[in-house]
Structure formats: structure tokens, C-alpha cells
Image (cartoon, helix red, strand yellow):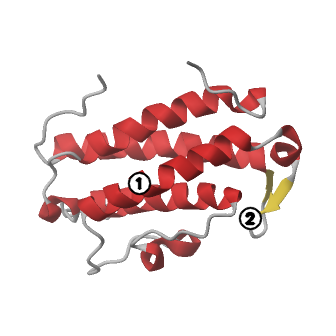
Amino acid sequence: METQTASNRTKALLALFDYQTKFFARALEGISEEDMHNRLNTQANHPAWLAGSLVQQRFMMAGETGTSFKQTGEELFKNNKGIQSGVKYPTTAEYLTDWERITPKAREALVTIDDKKLDSEIDMGGMKMTYYEMICFSIYREASIIGQLALWRRLLGYPALKYD
């Protein structure tokens, strides 16, 4: 049964959100904690940072419902903080627990946001965009990060991400 959304503009975004909800856990499946912090001698964001950044994004989306929950690694990711060298990031289990805890609230925000709110602007610190534009970017970014995690799986010698 299809979920009814407050705006027709969020229907397709909700479908992507639901797919990505499943793919996130699959992208992390079986990666050792050591490999989660492996940058393969590059400046690339390691899987632990990518995962935490994505979890943080869902917490921010859920904030639209008035939720004040915070993820385990909040201090490492707030204000769009980049990767930090020499820092131990939360475990995969902690990320997955936070993901499962916040996803229903983030989904609720996506289902209940109406056209009036979607059309209102947010100031992103020098850049303005509508909530609709911000949500579109957030959904795009989720897919991008899951794709990066899928690539890391292969680079680190793990089986490919399973989409079925």
C-alpha cells in the first residue's frame, strides 16, 4: 500500500528514501571496524565518516518534526564538520542503532511536509534555498554516500552491495 504524502512533490522522494533506508545497512554489512577507518592512504573520507555523515543528515531531516534526538557521534558531525584525522568514530553497530531510531521520524517529516513549508526558504549561511530544494539535495546526497560506501566495499575487498 502506497503512503499518502501531504504534497505530491514528495511521493517520489519518499520512494527513494525507503530504498536508501534498506541500502544503508547493506552497504555497511560485514565491514570490519578497522576497515571502517581505512582511507587506503588517500585523503578520501573513510566509511566511518561517510556513514556518520549520512546518519547525521537523517537526524537533521527528523528535526523538521520537532525531534531533538541526537546521534551518538553528534559532536563529530554537527555543523557539517568534515573528516578529522586520528579520531575514533562510532562503531557500525552504533550507526545502525541511530539509523533505526531516527528513520521513522525522518520519514514522518517527509510524509507530512506540505507545499507551504516546501516553498518556504531556509538560510543556509549565505545561501538560500527552499525546503523542497534542501530535501531533494538530501535525498540525492544519501544515494551518493551509499554509492561511495558500495565502492569502498569493493576497494577494501568485500563483496559488492546487494540491492535485492
Mark 2 vs mark 1: in front: 1
Marked residue nearer the N-terminal end (2 or 1): 1
Towards the viewer: 72 or 112: 112
Residue situated furthest top in the rendering: 1
**The N terminus - image quarter:** top right
- Neighbours of disc 2 within 10 Å: few (<14), some (14-19), many (20+): few
Q: Is residue 94 left or right of residue 159?
A: right
Q: Is residue 53 visible?
A: yes
The part of the image, by quadrant, that contains residue 44 is bottom left
**Residue sitting at 39 percent across and 72 percent down?**
72
**Residue sitting at 26 percent across and 77 percent down?**
88
Residue 2, percent from left and from top: 59, 20
Tell me the residue that label 2 is attached to: 124
Gap between marks 2 and 1 measured at Cα: 24 Å
Regarding mark 1 in the picture, which secondary structure is present there? helix
Tell me the residue that label 1 is attached to: 99
Residue 33, percent from left and from top: 16, 63
